[in-house]
Image (cartoon, coloured by chain):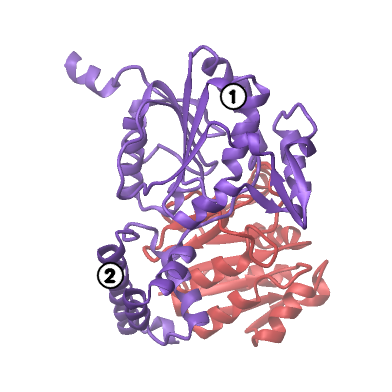
Chain colours: A purple, B red
Amino acid sequence: MVCMDSNLQESRDIEIDLLLEAVFRKYGHDFRDYIRVHIKRRIDHRMRISGCEHISDMQHRVLYDRHFFEVFLQDFSINVTELFRDPSFYLTVRRDIVPVLKTYPHIKIWHAGCATGEEVYSMSILLREEGLSDKARIYATDYHRAVVQRAKRGVYPIENMKEYTLNYQKSGGRHSFADYYRADYGSAVLDRSLRDGIIFADHNLVTDGVFGDMHMVVCRNVLIYFNRDLQHRVIRLFMDSLLPGGFLCLGKKETLRFSGCDHLFEPVSNSEKIYKKRLFDSGDRIRRDL
Amino acid sequence: MNAYEAVVIGGSAGGLEALEIILKTLPAGFPAPVAAVFHLSPDSDNYMVEYLNRNCRVWIKEAEDKEMIHPGRVYLAPPNYHLMVNTDRTLVLSAEPRINYSRPSIDPLFETAADVLGTRLVGVLLSGANRDGSRGMKRIKENGGLAVVQSPETTLAPQMVEAAMATVTADHVLPPDAIGALINRLFGKT
């Protein structure tokens, strides 16, 4: 019956608020607008492992123990991603987006919340096969510096390669996937040349600013961890980062529908959640027409 | 007034057949929401939702991220995403790593629903060939909810319900049609 004691629940909620506030004020990482149940589950997980009895104990450790904060930060980053995750997404990019990208003299793509980089390299492979590598620049960012470093290395467990090869084939891949990596002591090391044209950087979607003049922003399965208010702010940020006619790619179960920004984009693929920034702000036009 | 407010259901191999039997017993306008996790292949389509809707009177739909929960609806976790109940009682999805080798996994739905609904939750675990759902059932019982499992001899694969029964004392161990009747009784319809 422990969890149903509403008094206890209230106290725990206050403790979580204070913990997130402490992390924000001390380290600048802002998790206050993340979906609460995800935050709670991660805190519970860390409490069990670390032997902290109360959330307040964690707050103390986070404030005074830099190493513990790094662990806490690791808990909060959701690092699951695959090479060519959702193959149908890449298939749609090849079919519907690439022909448009080919019309530009150069292309800038932002992978926001790139985690360990699998989707960034997937895009790099796709661009190479479509003959766009030389004129493309990819900006791959995540808020967690250690994660960005891992993304930069491009080394993944070899046992995942079977699944990734299958994904690659389903995504419209035209070569032998094995040509893109070499096996090295239980790891798959991606071809270094895939990194050409990728710039890795830390950037926090919650607290940092615009990445300008993008032709495409890819941010898949990141917004689902944000509450509506924060989602809205981040989509605004993407909106301001995209050139008119630029593409916004979200995760399969993410939508612009409740963002308050949907009038600024037109859907390109409803099933793959690919949107195109309108050439003009239809809201402005409506206001002008009035 | 009903003592219970919502139902969560989980299953794996052979579980969908049992789910169909249970859902068929529910009347249109069933007064509570149902959220369900079944292990499906990551690229399975909407077939299951369409199939169940053709054969049941309650409305079955794929759960959407940040969706409000309504009575009389059955929310199925989409393939390749975990389904959970947020503290504000909305449904949320997550792309976190597989739990018990599964995404969606039954445990996170059961645990988060138990935390929010406590004594007002009914948890139902059906046929399956792994151990997913045991931790969730434990949390439901700890928080005062009702634990119902499919009787092992009526399952296609008994491992999941047996694992749960080794972890918690189930309140009811029943074949699927009797689980349907029980749910109807608990929510005031006979």
Q: Which residue does the image show at 31% across and 75% down from the upper left?
A: A63
Which element is circle 2 on? helix
- Is circle 2 on the same chain as circle 1? yes
CA gap between label 2 and label 1 equals 43 Å
Q: Which residue does the image show at 60% across and 60% down from the upper left?
A: B36
- Amino acid of disc 2: Ala
Percent x, y for residue A71? 47, 69
User: Which label sits on residue A133?
Assistant: 1
Percent x, y for residue B93? 51, 54
Quadrant containing the N terminus of chain B is bottom left
Indicate the chain on which mark 1 is placed: A
Q: Which residue does the image show at 77% across and 41% down from the upper left?
A: A166
In front: label 2 or label 1: 1
Label 2: which residue? A22
A81 sits left or right of A226 in the view: right
Q: Nearer the viewer, residue A151 or A192?
A: A192
Using the image, determine if residue B29 lies above or below residue A271.
below
